[in-house]
C-alpha cells in the first residue's frame, strides 16, 4: 500500500457523497428512487433567479473571464455590504468582507486562520462537515451531542463547560442538517459566554472566535426568525466571522459565490490563505451577483414563491410523518423551521423484514428504507452523530410535489412489512 501523508491516510471521505454515488448507480440501473439526500436543488424545479442568469450571461459576453481580485471584486463587496445592511442591519466595510467560491473555502480558511494543530474547536453534532474541517486542521474535537428536545441545537449550558482554551466555536443557524434554528434567548446566552471567556484571557492570548454559518439565514418559515450574534450582542463584532452567500437563498449552489465578513485582521489573513489556494468565485459570476443583489424587487420576487415552494414540501412531508406516527409506526419528525431540511426519525433497528432479516444496525435501516420504500435520506451519523442514531436529514431541494403521496405510500407499505 502506498504511504502518503498522515493527514491523507487518516482522512475519511464524505458519507453523503458515498450515499449519493450509490443512489445514482441504482437510478442508472432503472430504479425509481426518491432521492432526498442532496443539500442542493434540482435546477429544473428550482432554477436560479432569471435576472441573475441573464446577468451572468451578459458578464461573460463582456469578457469577464480573468482572475478576480483576491478579496473579491470591489463592486461585489460593496453590494454585499449594502445587502447585509438592508436585510440584517449589519454594517461592515469592504475591507471586512471576503469573497470566495461558496462557503467551503471560507470555512476552511477560517479554520486555518484561527486554529493551530492541537487547538480545541467546539461544534455540535449533528452538523455539516465541522468534524472534517477540524480533522483537516489537526485540531482537537470538542463535539457537543445535541438532543431532539432542543431541536438538535447546542445550548449555552452544553457549551459552557468546554470553553476554557477553545479557539473556535462553530455555530450554524438555520442548521444543516436539521433545518432548525437557534432562538434569540439561547444565542444571547452563548454570546455572553464568549464575551466572558475572552475577557478572562490575558492580553496577547488567543481569543475565542465564533464561526457563524448563516447560509440559510433567509430561508425561515412561519414564526421562525433568524438572529445573529452581532445584532444581539454588539461586542460580539470583534469575535464573530459570518459565512454567507447566494448558494442556498437563490438556489445557486453551482454559481459558487460566497462571502465571509468579520473583524478586518481575521478577514485579511483569510484573504492571504485564499490568495495561495485560489478558491475565488468566477469573475463573471461576481459581476453578475454585484448587479443582482441591489435589485430589491428582483430579489423579493424570487424569494417569496421560492420560500413558499420549499415550505409547502417540508410541511406536507412533516404532516405525512405525523400521520404515520399516529398510526403507530415508530417514526417521528421535527416541525419545519428553516432551510431545505426536515429532521425525521426512523426508529426501526431491532425489527425484522418480511423475509426474516434482522435490522440490527441503523445502517441496515437506511438500506431497508432505500430498497423497500425507495426513499433515500442521510443518517445523522454522516454528520458526526452516534452510529446508531435513528435520526435523518431529508432534503426537499430535488423534491417534486406531485411525488409526495406516492413516496409516503411506499414508506407506509415498507413499515407495514416489518415485524
Image (cartoon, helix red, strand yellow):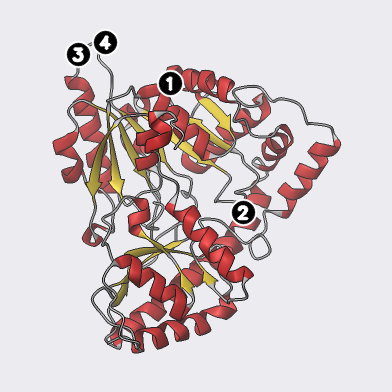
> Is residue 245 found left or right of 7 in the rendered image?
right
**Is 171 situated left or right of 88 in this image?**
left
Residue at 62% x, 27% y: name it. 72
Between the C-alphas of marks 2 and 4, the distance is 45 Å
Name the residue tied to disc 4.
Answer: 204
Can you name the residue that lies furthest to the left here? 161
**Neighbour tally class for label 1: few under 14, some 14-19, many 20 plus, Cα within 10 Å:** many
Q: Which residue occupies the foreground of this view, 74 or 247?
A: 247
Cβ atoms under marks 3 and 4 closer than 8 Å: yes
* Label 3 – label 4 distance at C-alpha: 6 Å
Q: Residue at x 58, y 20 (%)?
A: 275
Between the C-alphas of marks 3 and 1, the distance is: 19 Å
Mark 1 and mark 4 lie on one chain; the one further toward the N terminus is: 4
Disc 3 to disc 2, C-alpha distance:
47 Å
Find out whether the residues at labels 1 and 2 contact each other: C-beta distance under 8 Å.
no
- What residue occupies the far right of the structure in this picture? 61
- Look at mark 2 in the image and give the residue it sits on: 300
Disc with the residue nearer the chain's start (3 vs 1): 3
Image depth: mark 2 or mark 4 in front: 4
Q: Quadrant of residue 403?
A: bottom right
Disc 1 versus disc 4: distance between alpha carbons?
15 Å
Q: CA distance from mark 1 to mark 2?
A: 32 Å
Give the residue at mark 3.
202
Question: At which x and y percent is residue 386?
Answer: 26, 55
Q: Which residue is mark 1?
A: 266
* Disc with the residue nearer the chain's start (3 vs 2): 3
Front residue of 186 and 413: 413
Amino acid at each position: 500500500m502506498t504511504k502518503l501523508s498522515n493527514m491523507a491516510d487518516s482522512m475519511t471521505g464524505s458519507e453523503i457523497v458515498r450515499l449519493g454515488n450509490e443512489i445514482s448507480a441504482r437510478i442508472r440501473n432503472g430504479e425509481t428512487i426518491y432521492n432526498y439526500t442532496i443539500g442542493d436543488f434540482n435546477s429544473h424545479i428550482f432554477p436560479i433567479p432569471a435576472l441573475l442568469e441573464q446577468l451572468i450571461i451578459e458578464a461573460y459576453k463582456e469578457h469577464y473571464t480573468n482572475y478576480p481580485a483576491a478579496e473579491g471584486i470591489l463592486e461585489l463587496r460593496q453590494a454585499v455590504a449594502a445587502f447585509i445592511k438592508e436585510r440584517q442591519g449589519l454594517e461592515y466595510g469592504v475591507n471586512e468582507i471576503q469573497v470566495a467560491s461558496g462557503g467551503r473555502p471560507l470555512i476552511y480558511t477560517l479554520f486555518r486562520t484561527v486554529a493551530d494543530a492541537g487547538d480545541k474547536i467546539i461544534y455540535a453534532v449533528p452538523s455539516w462537515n465541522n468534524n472534517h474541517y477540524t480533522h483537516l486542521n489537526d485540531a482537537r474535537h470538542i463535539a457537543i451531542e445535541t438532543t431532539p428536545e432542543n431541536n438538535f441545537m447546542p445550548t449555552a449550558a452544553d457549551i459552557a463547560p468546554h470553553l476554557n482554551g477553545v479557539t473556535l466555536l462553530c455555530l450554524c443557524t438555520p442548521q444543516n442538517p436539521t433545518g432548525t434554528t437557534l432562538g434569540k434567548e439561547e444565542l444571547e446566552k452563548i454570546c455572553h459566554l464568549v464575551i466572558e471567556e475572552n475577557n478572562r484571557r490575558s492580553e496577547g492570548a488567543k481569543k475565542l472566535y465564533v464561526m457563524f454559518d448563516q447560509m440559510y439565514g433567509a430561508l425561515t418559515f412561519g414564526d421562525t426568525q433568524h438572529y445573529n450574534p452581532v445584532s444581539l450582542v454588539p461586542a460580539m463584532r470583534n469575535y464573530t466571522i459570518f459565512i454567507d452567500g447566494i448558494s442556498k437563498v437563490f438556489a445557486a449552489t453551482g454559481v459558487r459565490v460566497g462571502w465571509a465578513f468579520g473583524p478586518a485582521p481575521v478577514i485579511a489573513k483569510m484573504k492571504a490563505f485564499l490568495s495561495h489556494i485560489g478558491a475565488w468565485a468566477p469573475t463573471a459570476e461576481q459581476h453578475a451577483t454585484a448587479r443582482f443583489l441591489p435589485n430589491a424587487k428582483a430579489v423579493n420576487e424570487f424569494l417569496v414563491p421560492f420560500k413558499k415552494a420549499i415550505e409547502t414540501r417540508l410541511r406536507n412531508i412533516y404532516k405525512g410523518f405525523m400521520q404515520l406516527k399516529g398510526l403507530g409506526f415508530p417514526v417521528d419528525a421535527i416541525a419545519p423551521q428553516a432551510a431545505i431540511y426536515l429532521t425525521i426519525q426512523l426508529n426501526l433497528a431491532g425489527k425484522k423484514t418480511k423475509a426474516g432479516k434482522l435490522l440490527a444496525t441503523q445502517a441496515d435501516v437506511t438500506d431497508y428504507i432505500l430498497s423497500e420504500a425507495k426513499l433515500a435520506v442521510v443518517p445523522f451519523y454522516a454528520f458526526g452523530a452516534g452510529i446508531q442514531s435513528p435520526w435523518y436529514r431529508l432534503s426537499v431541494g430535488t423534491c417534486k410535489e406531485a411525488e409526495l403521496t406516492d413516496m409516503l405510500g411506499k414508506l407506509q407499505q415498507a413499515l407495514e412489512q416489518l415485524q
